[in-house]
Image (cartoon, helix red, strand yellow):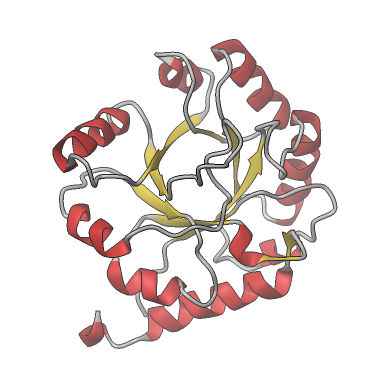
């Protein structure tokens, strides 16, 4: 069986059923601390969820999703939430990666996958981010009517074939987000080999995380893992 990518279930909110954490395939959980997002969780509520998650799985990695704000504001919010990783989505001050890392956090940088205009410039920008971040998370461009700062969670995929072509130039840890579902995750993994995948709306029912959908996603990942290597 192929080694499965890491799996982050993102956008958790108070009241969500966390029993999916009993499955070892889930390695990360994410909390959206962007006030404009419909999945917004205040740092104190995120802290309660982090503690609940780690009671079930002490080894799970907790991620705060942020967009904008000062170094002090972001660092204090992450500290109150008790997360391990801060995922930056843009609008943060220069040098925040070093500040957060010195405070004990890993730092990820989310990047909209948009190399169409100038691939070389896009790669240069990605490498620049990767030089100061622990990982890059590629997501789809937000729709034109998205609220400012809400750069993810829109259920949109991007051009995975183009990502496949470009990934040969990546020499850093990278994740994929954007419209990943139990129905399409095998297709994604047949094309690319990210360190991890980040899933939110694709495992929701009625706007909330659904344990059944999460299990379906894991089953699809495991099915990909058992596929013959000759078809990859």
In percent of width and height, residue 32 lies at 65, 39
In percent of width and height, residue 58 lies at 66, 50
Q: Which sits in the foreground, 86 or 153?
A: 153
For residue 185, above or below residue 142: below
Quarter location, residue 22:
bottom right
Q: Which sits in the foreground, 36 or 184?
A: 36
Q: Residue at x 50, y 64 (%)?
A: 180
State the residue lying farthest toward the right.
15
Q: Is residue 173 left or right of residue 149?
A: left
Q: Is residue 130 left or right of residue 198?
A: left
For residue 96, above or below residue 167: above
Q: Is residue 9 left or right of residue 13?
A: left
State the residue lying farthest toward the front.
145
Q: Which sits in the foreground, 3 or 174?
A: 174
Quarter location, residue 72:
top right
In percent of width and height, residue 78 lies at 64, 27
Q: Is residue 58 left or right of residue 117?
A: right
Q: Quadrant of the N terminus?
A: bottom left
In percent of width and height, residue 190 lies at 32, 74
Q: Residue at x 42, y 62 (%)?
A: 5
Q: Quadrant of the C terminus?
A: bottom left
Q: Residue at x 35, y 86 (%)?
A: 227
Marks counted in the figure total 0
Q: Residue at x 32, y 60 (%)?
A: 159
For residue 45, above or below residue 80: below
């Amino acid at each position: 069986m192929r080694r499965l990518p890491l799996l982050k279930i993102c956008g958790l909110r108070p009241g969500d059923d966390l029993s999916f954490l009993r499955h070892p395939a889930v390695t990360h959980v994410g909390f959206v601390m962007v006030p404009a997002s419909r999945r917004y969780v205040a740092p104190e509520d995120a802290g309660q969820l982090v503690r609940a998650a780690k009671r079930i799985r002490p080894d799970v990695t907790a991620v705060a999703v942020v967009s904008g704000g000062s170094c002090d504001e972001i660092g204090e919010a992450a500290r109150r939430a008790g997360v391990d990783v801060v995922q930056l989505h843009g609008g943060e001050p220069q040098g925040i990666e070093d500040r957060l890392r010195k405070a004990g956090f890993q730092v990820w940088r989310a990047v909209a996958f948009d190399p169409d205009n100038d691939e070389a410039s896009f790669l240069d920008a990605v490498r620049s981010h990767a030089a100061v971040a622990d990982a890059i998370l590629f997501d789809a461009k937000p729709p034109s009517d998205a609220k400012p700062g809400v750069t993810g969670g829109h259920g949109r995929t991007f051009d995975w074939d183009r990502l496949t072509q470009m990934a040969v130039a990546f020499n850093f840890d990278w994740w994929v987000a954007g419209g990943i579902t139990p129905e399409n995750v095998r297709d994604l993994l047949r094309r690319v080999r990210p360190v991890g995948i980040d899933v939110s709306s694709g495992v929701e029912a009625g706007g909330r995380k659904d344990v059944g959908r999460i299990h379906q996603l894991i089953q699809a990942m495991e099915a990909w893992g058992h596929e013959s290597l000759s078809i990859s």
